[in-house]
Image (cartoon, grey):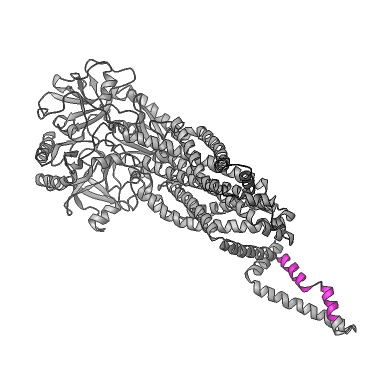
Amino acid sequence: MDRWCNLLRMRLRSWMRRKRVETELDRELRYHLERQVEENLAAGISAGEARLAALRMFGGVSQVQEECREMRRTQYVENLWQDLRYAVRMLGKSPVFTVVVVLTLALSIGANSAIFSVIDGVLLKPLPYPRAERLARVFYRSKNFAKFPVNPWDFLDFRARNRSFESFAIYTRSDIQLSGVGEPVKLSAFRISAGYFTVLGVAPARGREFDFVEERPGNGNVVILSDRLWRRQFGAATDILGRKIVLDAKPYTVVGVMPPGVDHPGNAYNSVAYGDTVDAWYPFEFEGNPGQRGPHYLEGIGRLKPGVTVTQAAADFNTIMADLATHYPGDQGWTIYMVPLYQEIVGPVHRLLLVLLGAVGLVLLIACVNTANLLLARATARQREIAVRAALGAGRWRLVRQMLAESLLMAILGGGLGALLASAGVRALVAFLPAGFPRLAAIHVNGLVFGFTALITLATGLFFGLVPALQSSRTDLQQGLREGGRGATGTGRQTRLRSALVVGEVSLACVLLAGAGVMLRSFLNLLHTDAGFQPLHVLTARVSLPDTTYKTKDAIARFYKTLLDGLSTLPGVQAAGAGTDLPWTGYDDNLGGFTIEGKQEPPNESFHARYHAATPDYFRAIGIPLVRGRYFTDRDIKGAPRALIVNQAMARRYWPNEDPVGWRIDFFDDKPKDSDWYTIVGVVGDVKDKPQNSAAEPAFWWPIPQQPWGFGDMSVVLRSASDPVRLTGHLREAVRGLDPSLAVADVRLLDQVAAESFSTPRISLFLVGLFAALALSLAAIGIYGVISYSVSQRMHEFGMRVALGASSWDVIRLVMGQSVALTAIGVTLGLGTTLALAGILDSMLYGVSAKDPLTLICVAATAVATAAMACYPSARRATSADPVAALRAE
């Protein structure tokens, strides 16, 4: 051990204090030489002969110095430094070549680092909760619904009876309005059960979590604030605990403030994505009839006990569910399934991110192949230089090391520039990604990303540098030292290798082109799909009526009727309506059960559909067409026969061969009276939950005055004949005129709402298309390089062909034939690879297969056309071959 430590100290000292060590070595050698000279003189040898004898004995001072350096292993560092200096000089002599290679590498390495930053933030970093791997989401599943929320009363049974969770909680979005602190402000808020923060493993920074007693009706007037809201609205007041604040016109006592960074843990039933800002939490109060197992609108989350798996927990819950189904008809036909919280959060984008990583990885591979091709061409031009170095004693490894130094130097320059590009690219990506993209706040360039960049930089330098270096170092001295002749332009082996690299480039580019092509067709299909509504020229806004002020359904109905009657008289307003939900926003994931008069529920299944409430002109304002029957009217009020509108999907499911108009439906009544029934008065067109969905879900609407619950939170929609933005001020004034304490929130155009639904496929198409364009450009450069080099080699041949009567077109056809042949091989391999990998993309596409023949044909045509354009300049140059010079050379 001591020997190794001494050896290490000696080598470190030799590397880090080189001048001092060299001086000491020189002084010591001179000392020994002088002592030997003195001994020779003492032996009677003359002065001149004494020194010569001493030198002969030492064998040469320089040789001894070199032996000492080899013992210290310092020559490797010195040789490396020498190789790097020589590489800098050589690259400086070819600035255009160097700039092209460095920029190519910078773009490809930067793109890889940027995408890796996203993958690191979204997929690799653990969730910001203690032991997050034990967090699981709980969902219902039935024959008709693959994934659905929990109902309140089942939750209480699950919480009391399960043996799998340390703690189990529910939450649901329920925005509230803060007043009395400046202008009224709408807060993003959640109603939660007691123990919710215990499940997440976080605790309030100030105060306490909710108690179970606060889940009882009338006890829930307490609130926990986010750190953000506490600082923004209350100036980080230290006396905030115990303070009364007004939420939805009702006093709430602040009992806690959460630490910074505690946001929403997962997708909620009404379109709140992971990481979205939450301003406040207040207790969910369990009220109503425990025997009525509905509606389903709560999100379940639990923390597994140590050693319990998600599968075991789901089995435990399903045992409870089966028992509940024997007591409550509303629970029949349902099962429970669970997924880890991490999977629920990142699952929707997991495949997308891996596809993007694969695409950008192909770009890097193409860049490496292209650079290797350029280096092979450059090595051919340096054949004489390499031969001279070999003739002077340079071994093959030394030649390879010298050329690898140049490759690594270019890779390092490209990697450094790529890291800068990645930093800017990540900021652009985060700004470009949709607001609902999971874990946006965790995406940034960090040490791991820089480490990844350094790793791929090193690997890239070795990859594109090693093959050309090995090929070039296998030089023929006699051929390389010849000063002229046609044989000095390269070997057949190098030509075949360069052609093979071009084929690889084309095949990889075709894979990316095919991916971009089918994603483009999918995106176009989405854009041209029937939305089911008309989003243009529609202004939307959210208005929330607090139940303390608007205690009855009549009060809610009167407010919206007065508001909409006033707005409908504004110039240019074609229709003014209000509804609980907007299309494609996720606010319509709620589910209600019902009874159809005269129809029996199928075995192990119950009648369910999504429910909404709307004013008479809501459908006209939003542009949902009437298919059969009528819209709501002002006569559909409390006390009038109850009316209901269903969509076509509900009509097809429950009345497949009948007209649903006139049929009656009841909600929540075991023995309904005649006045309890709702009569279907109209059928409207389908609107899918998301444009990517294959079909719409069954849904129905109540008139606001006849809704079973007092929905006071509504989206107001105004259809205008001109620019709807001008109505914003009028809308705010109208609401303020009716109730100054109300806030008008989420003011947007409906077409903006619709456009947000396309944000993920749009950015996927943009990035893959960008990578495909870069790959195609690199492949074109590779084709141009190979054909240009080939033409340079064959100029004598072309001259002879012209002398023997070949026309310019014959020469062009000969050159372009070589290009097309290489491209055809690459296209064949690329399309074969595309077909093999088609299953990866199929689940991300809409209305098109990854094996779409039209797309593959277009890819092949694009690749061939690009190759033709890339080689045409070289083909034209080939026609300028001088036949006289060719004959003279013969």
Q: Is residue 18 left or right of residue 133?
A: right
Question: Quick check: 705 above or below 89?
Answer: above
Residue at the spot 33% in from the left edge and 17% down from the top edge: 603
Residue 623 pos. (x, y %): 21, 33
Residue most toward the right? 44
Q: Tell me where residue 24 sits by quadrant.
A: bottom right
Residue 620 pos. (x, y %): 17, 32
Q: Quadrant of the N terminus?
A: bottom right
Q: Main secondary structure of the magenta part?
A: helix
The residue segment tinted magenta is 50-73
Of 816 and 316, nearer the camera is 816
Q: Tell me where residue 611 sits by quadrant.
A: top left
| Count of number-bearing discs | 0
Inspect this view and state whether residue 617 appears. yes
> Is 698 included in the stretch rendered in magenta?
no
Question: Quick check: 715 above or below 22?
Answer: above
Question: Quick check: 545 above or below 142?
Answer: below
Q: Is residue 375 left or right of residue 738?
A: right
Inspect this view and state whether residue 283 appears. no
Residue 339 pos. (x, y %): 41, 35
Of 670 and 220, nearer the camera is 670
> Is 60 included in the stretch rendered in magenta?
yes
